[in-house]
Amino acid sequence: MPEATGRLVAVANLKGGSGKSTLAVHLAGVLGERGWRAILLDADPQHTAYLWAKRVRLPADAERQPLGSIVDARRWVVQLLGLLSEYDFVVLDLPSVIGPAVASALLLGHVVLVPVPPAAVDVEGTQRTLRYVRSAREARTGAPPMVRLVPVRIANGHDLSALCARLAVFGEPLALPLGEYPELAACFADGVWIGSDSRFALARQAFDRLAQLVEGLATGAGEPPLVARARRLEVPPAAKTVRPLRHLAPGAAATPRRGFAWLATLWRRLPKGTGRPSAPVRG
């Protein structure tokens, strides 16, 4: 398989309803319109982003690839690396609960976008998310993920300076805010995206700026250590050849340190070799 030269953009927030799927779908579409080979990968068991993308003429591919069990983590990672060999950008919509998918994405992602609505309760959810981001940084010495907080649903007249002051305590840089565009609320129900027609012109401009930021961040991001290691591995493609790690409990990802510890253990147990990971199994 060709080397994994694409860039993984993980959209993460452990607070449900933060706008992850909206951000992921439109960003993937805009990247596709800008000429990149882009794919939307939905790891949320609800498949909201995938179902949405399949209903619209999104200029990007879409797949669903949930990861609910630790025993499937190796196959999931290998499939993800396969997509990175085929696409310039993989935009990953993550679930709102900590687990194998979130831990894997933070260890493998080049760019991490954290959508943050203005409500105080959503800001608290962001704090939990960033604890895991910090754990990923510790595990990725020399090649940390490029992280941006993305203020979303910012209404006209909202005191943006107050929100920025609250977010400043996290110590993470901010992307330009995405406004509260009323027409976006009907996109899923109407089966459209912001590139469908001119009524989304303002939202389209905002996402175009975000896409430009992502392109710049991805260019400057170092290669995650696990991606580099994967290039030296020869992994069997069939699901039946993936040995379950029975000594690791399903709840091993309950805390940041244990979550990244079990994933590191998983990768140490992969067969060593000079080959490349096998092609992904499409579902």
Image: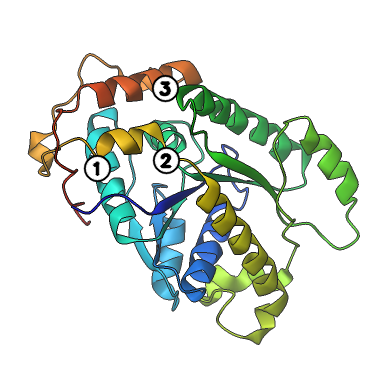
Camera-near label (2 vs 1) is 2
Are discs 1 and 3 less than 8 Å apart at CB?
no
In percent of width and height, residue 248 lies at 27, 16
Residue in view at x 44 percent, y 36 percent = 102
Task: Kindly identify which residue carries mark 3.
Answer: 259
Q: Quadrant of the C terminus?
A: bottom left
Camera-near label (3 vs 2) is 2
Task: Kindly identify which residue carries mark 2.
Answer: 223
Residue in view at x 19 percent, y 43 percent = 277
Query: Of callouts 1 and 3, which one flags the residue occurring earlier in the amino acid sequence?
Result: 1
Q: Amino acid at mark 3?
A: Gly
Q: Amino acid at mark 2?
A: Glu
Nearer to the camera, 252 or 59: 59
> Mark on residue 78?
1
Instruction: Work out whether 268 lies above or below 278.
Output: above
| Label 3 – label 2 distance at C-alpha | 21 Å
**Secondary structure under badge 2?**
loop
Q: Amino acid at mark 1?
A: Val
In percent of width and height, residue 186 lies at 61, 71
Q: Is residue 168 visible?
A: yes
* 10 Å crowding of disc 3: few (<14), some (14-19), many (20+): many
Camera-near label (1 vs 3) is 1
| Label 1 – label 3 distance at C-alpha | 19 Å
